Image (tube, coloured by chain):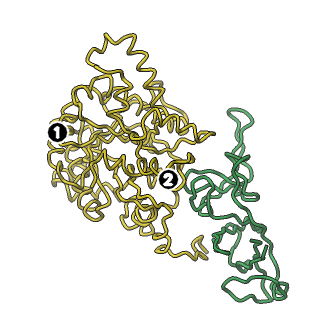
Amino acid sequence: MTPEDGRIIPAEAQANASRVKQKVIDCDVHHALRSGRDLLPYMATRWHAHLEEFGRRRPVPFIASSPYPKTAPALSRTDSWPPNGGPPGSDLAFLQEQLLDRYNIEYGMLHLLMSGMDERNQDFGNATCSAINDWQYENWTQKDQRLKAAIVVPGEDPPAAVREIARWAGNPDFAQVSMVTHAIEPLGRRRYWPIYEAAQAHNLPIGLHSSGNNGHAVTGTGWCGFYVEEQHNVALSQQQLAISLVCEGVFERFPKLKAVIIEAGYVWVPSVAWRLDQHYKRMHREMPHLTRKPSDYFRSHLWYSSQPADEPERPEDLRTVLDWIGWDRLLFSTDYPHWDMDNPEQAFKLRLSEAEQKMIYNENARAVYGLA
Amino acid sequence: MPRHVVAPVADIPPGTRKIVTIRGREIGIFNLAGEFFALLNRCPHQGAELCRGTLVGLATSPEPGVFELSRRGEMLKCPWHGWEYDIRTGQSWCDPNDTKVRAYPVTVEPGETLAKGPFVAETFPVAVEQDYVVVDV
């Protein structure tokens, strides 16, 4: 006897019965490799042998575990393991059924939680990034036009990253450039600027989903004892990343650059921006390269994905926050198939007007990513 | 509340569950060491299919460093965000005052009694020599 027995509503009927009338652009969808070997067909033979002999070499602690928050195997909804095997997110047909069809998803922005950027062997890392992009193109975006990939780049080797951007730019299957967020230096540093220059030149936003390992604790204060701590500290690291981009002057040098902060929530934006403005008033001589107060950049160059949804006791408090950030800044995301996925039908306990729904669930993302 | 015969007792052995649809609602029927419980298959938080979740115990601690695991298998943990519900009452562990999943009374009745009615049998015939799980919905 399995829990499936006695189930009357067939999958097809359920798939067609989305209760979301609004078409959704989901700004955080995780596809997955069945195994690292999936990338081999897209890599030179030299790297096949390398993978066998030496393997990947990343600055990763917790050898048999992961520093990332998890409360479930593969960080995933326990009901998201594909019936045909493989880890959650690795089966296109199941992802279509459980996410795209079920929730009326017009576009899903893919973020693979694996990159060659934090591989220490840079040539292998570069080959890994290129292979990931070929794999995404052939197995995902070409098979379902609702899915849009991010150009995964080896950000620690900017010339290689720029070449990888040039290889895919203009291809409508790729909607943004993605880098790991736990990099060797904060991503606002100039060593990464050639990547921003290329992204701006090709009119591609930078998608920054918390990811990667750089050997440091995600906090500035050491390794945490509990996933509960880590779950919050990951969002803090995204705040530090946004602060770095703003303070280093990335948006002054690249005034058309758009950056999307993914999976860090958004309620923190006003408090971080107010605090920075206060410091800026007092110490602006340290940063004469900024021509506007820091909060202006947070409201003109940065966008924020919605998940994990904040759930204040008084849901209407979110309105105050969004009034400050700007309703055009928020991009709805599910984070499927991860355990903390937000359901488009129920994530916002705040009552949204039709116009607000349209913006958050669809129009804001369409504008940022220039989707048809 | 009409009483619905959902399965022969033997179909839901201890430690297993069955999800049935009664009057348009999906309901999970659980056999916990011989006791039966029924909960609506929908998490009030974000709508996941709650009854596909894992059954866990209650972890409590009177002080840091001391841990107790009690009521093994009596808390149903949602497949998504891991919200836990008391399988006996549907009460939420994380938000006990405001969140509750609908729980339905379940009884075991001998086939002999059921033959007399009034009961709504689901999609199988009821035999007098067996016991059945009956849910009030």
Circle nearer the N terminus (1, 2): 2
> What secondary structure is found at the residue carrying circle 1?
helix
Can residue A318 be seen by looking at this rendering? yes
Above or below, comparing residue A176 to residue A186 in the picture:
below
The residue lying at 60 percent from left, 70 percent from top is A3
Dot 2 alpha-carbon crowd within 10 angstroms: few under 14, some 14 to 19, many 20 or more: few
Residue that carries the numbered disc 2 in the rendered image? A73
The residue labelled by disc 1 is A201
**A158 to the left or right of A223:** left
Q: CA distance from mark 1 to mark 2?
A: 40 Å
Report x, y in % for residue A144. 30, 64
Share a chain, discs 1 and 2? yes
Parent chain of label 2: A
Toward the viewer: B129 or A328? A328
Picture coordinates of residue A103 (x, y %)?
A: 45, 61
- In the rendered image, is residue A210 in sight? no
Q: Tag on residue A1?
A: none
Q: Colour of chain A?
A: yellow
**Residue nearest the viewer, comparing A89 with A215:** A89
Residue type marked 2:
Pro
The shade of chain B is: green
Residue at image coords 68%, 32%: B64
